Image: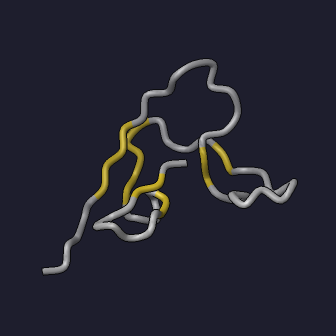
Amino acid sequence: MLEISVDAGPYQDILAAGGFFARGGYNGTISTCCGNPLAGRQAWTGNSGGFIDTDVAFTMKRAT
């Protein structure tokens, strides 16, 4: 998963922060078994067999 911090704020998932994947986005959800603290979150999962090109974009609205 990809998390960002905006203006020294808390880290949050790129999608929750208003971003989107133009290419190579998440391909699954982390399993809810085994007490994983990240369970249920979207992420890149499985074996890609190599590197995956990913493009991310987001719009920042700043307070003025």
Residue 47: x %, y % from top left:
68, 27
The extreme front residue here reads 8
Residue 42: x %, y % from top left:
61, 53
The extreme right residue here reads 34
Instruction: Relative to 32, say whether 52 is above or below.
Output: above
Residue 32: x %, y % from top left:
80, 57
The one nearer the camera, 37 or 55, is 37
The quarter of the displayed image where residue 63 is located: bottom left
Residue 9: x %, y % from top left:
37, 70
Q: Determine the residue positioned at 25% across, 64% down.
A: 60
The one nearer the camera, 37 or 57, is 37
Q: Determine the residue positioned at 60% across, 40% down.
A: 44
Which quadrant is the C terminus positioned in? bottom left
Q: Determine the residue positioned at 64% across, 58% down.
A: 41
The extreme left residue here reads 64
For the image shown, how many numbered marks are present on the structure? 0
The quarter of the displayed image where residue 35 is located: bottom right
Instruction: Relative to 54, say whether 21 is above or below.
Output: below
- Describe the colour scheme in one phrase: secondary structure
The extreme top residue here reads 49
